[in-house]
Amino acid sequence: MSNPVLFALVAGTCLLGAPAWAQSLKIALSSEPTAIDPHYHDLTPNNALVAHIFDGLTKQDEKQKVMPSLATSWENDGKNRWTFKLRQGVTFSNGKPFSADDVIFSFCRTLKNETAIAGSFADITGNFTAVEAPDPHTIVITTKAPDPLLPNFLSGLAILSSSIVPHDKLSFDPAKNCGVTGAWPVVGDFNDGKLTIGTGPYKFKSYVKGTGVELERNEKYWGPAEPWASVNFVPVPNAGPRLAGLLAGDYDVIENPAARDVSRIKDDKRFGHVITPSTRVIYFQLDVAREPSPFVKAENGKNPLKDPRVRKAMSLAIDRDAIIKRIMDGAAEPAYQFLPNGMFGALTDPPKLAYDPAAAKKLLAEAGYPNGFQITLSTTNDRYINDSQITQAVAQYLTQVGIRSEVDAMARAIYFPRRAKKEFSVALGGWGSTSGEASSFLRQWPATPDEAKTIGGSNYGGYSDPEFDKLIRTAIVTLDDAKRAEILQQAGTKAIEGGAFIPLHFESTVWAYKANLKYVGRADQFTMAMQVKPAQ
C-alpha cells in the first residue's frame, strides 16, 4: 500500500456581522436555472445557483483548484478509500447542526432521486461501495475502484440537511432506503423553497420561473459574511436587453453581453468587464447506433451517421474559424479536442480539424451518399452563447456539401429531457470540465455506459469503441498523474477519430458590471454573487 496522500487544508476565519455597506445586488443571467433542487440536473446555471445556498464537502476556486468547504481535509490510502474530516460548528440555515449524517443522506438522495435528469450526480455516488461515519465529524468513502478525482467531483455535490425528511438511523444502504422512512424529496419540494435548506452563504427567498430567483444573506453562514444583504438573479436570455439593462442601471452585473457590444462599454468609465477563457466545449453528438435514426432520411433507408466516413465529412464541412469570427465575435477558440490545450490530459498540440468541403463531398460519395441525405439538427436556443445561431450556421455548411439540414431549436427545459430520452439524431451540446481534466468529458459522453452509469451517463448517441473504453476505464482509476495524463491523451485521440462527437469551439465567458464593483471571472462559467465585491 502506498503512503496516504494528505491534503491538509486550512479554513478561512469567519467574519461576524454584516459590513456597513451591505446592500442588494441584481444580476442578469443569459441562461436561467431550470430548478432550485441541487441534485436535479448537473447543469452550469443550476450548479452556480446551488453554490449560493448549499455547500459541498469541497469547492473549486475561479481557476478550478480544489479547496476545503464542509470538509477541512482529506486523505487517500493509495487505493480506493478516502477519509474526509468535516468542519465543526456549522449549522444549516434552519439552525440544525451539520454532521456526517447529512453527508450520508445527501449521497443516498442522489441515488433515490426519481426526478433527476440523466441520473445527475449518481455517476459519482454510484461508484461508492460504502460510506461510513466513525464519528459525527468524519466520513470514510470506499469506492468500487480507485477514484483519483473524488475530491474534485464532490465539489459539485450539494449537502442537504437530513432534517428535511423523516428517518431512522441513516446508513449508506440505498437498497434499504438508507434509513429514510418518509418520501424522498422531488424537484418541486425545492422549487417552492420548502426543503431548500443549506449551509451556504445565502438563503432561498423566492423563485418564479421566467422571472427570477431572490436570495438573502445567511446570517448563520460559517464563512466570511457576504457584502450583499440580498441578491436577485433575473433571466434575460437576449444579449441586447441585458446590455440595455446594465446601461440603464437596472442591473449591477450581466453575464455574456455580445462580444461585439463589449467595445461599447470598454471605454466607458461607468462600467467594467472581464473576458475569461473557459473549459466549455461546444460540440454535436451524433446518433451512431440506431437504424433508422428518428431525424435522418436517406435514399437507402439506412442511418448514414453510422459510417465513420460520413461523420468525418460532417466535420470537414464546418468552418470553425468563420463561426468564431462571425458569430462568436472572436470570444472563443476553435476546438480540435474536448479540453483546451494545457489542461490536464489534453493533447498539447492536437491536429487541426480542417475545413475542406471538397474532401467532405468526396467522402460522402465514397460512403454511398453522392446525393447526400437529410437530417435535423436539434439545439437549445437559451443555453449556450449563440447556440441556435451556431446550429443554423452548421446547418448551412452541411447543406452546402449535400447534407440537407434543418434546425429544431427549443428551450433547454424542453430540450434536455428530450435529449436524455434519446429523441434526437444530431444534438448540440456544451460541456465544461467539472474536474479540470480531460476525463470529465471522456468518461461522461463517449464511454459505453456501465450498469451503474458511473461512466457513459450522457452517451445518448450509442457510440461504443472497446479500445476507447479500455483506455478511459484505465485512466479514471490510475492514481499516478503522469500515467493518467498519457492514457487520457490516447483516449482523447480515439474519441476524435471516432467522429461521433464533433467539437466546434471553446467558449470564453464575458461579464460586465458597474464600475463601483469588481468581479473575478471563473473558468467554470459560474456567475456567483460571491465573486462580486465593492471596488474599494
Image (cartoon, rainbow, N blue to C red):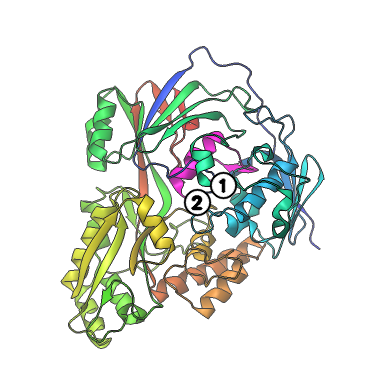
In this rendering, position of residue 515 left or right of residue 88: left
| Residue 536 visible in rendering | no
Q: Disc 2 vs disc 1: Cβ atoms closer than 8 Å?
A: yes
In the orientation shown, which residue stands out farthest toward the front?
182
| Residue 139 visible in rendering | yes
Residue range of the region highlighted in magenta in the rendering: 41-65
Residue at image x 30%, y 41%?
Answer: 237
> Of helix, strand and loop, which one carries label 2?
loop
Asked whether 206 or 56 is in front, the reply is: 206
Residue at image x 49%, y 51%?
Answer: 41
In the orientation shown, which residue stands out farthest toward the top?
20
Q: Quadrant of the C terminus?
A: top left
Look at discs 2 and 1 and give the one toward the viewer.
2
Disc 2 to disc 1, how far (Cα)?
A: 8 Å
Query: How many other residues sit within 10 Å of disc 2, few (<14), some (14-19) or many (≥20)?
Result: some
Image x and y of residue 444, in percent: 51, 63
Q: Is residue 58 magenta?
A: yes
In this rendering, position of residue 522 left or right of residue 473: left
> Of helix, strand and loop, which one carries label 1?
helix
In this rendering, position of residue 508 left or right of residue 323: right
Q: Mark 2: which amino acid? A: Asp
Looking at the image, is mark 2 or mark 1 earlier in the sequence?
A: 2
Q: Quadrant of the N terminus?
A: bottom right
Image x and y of residue 334, in percent: 33, 58
Residue 286 to residue 250: above or below: below
Residue 25 to residue 509: above or below: above
In this rendering, position of residue 372 left or right of residue 30: left
Asked whether 158 or 87 is in front, the reply is: 158
Mark 1, residue position: 156
Query: How many other residues sit within 10 Å of disc 1, few (<14), some (14-19) or many (≥20)?
Result: many
Mark 2, residue position: 42
Quarter of the view holding residue 358? bottom left
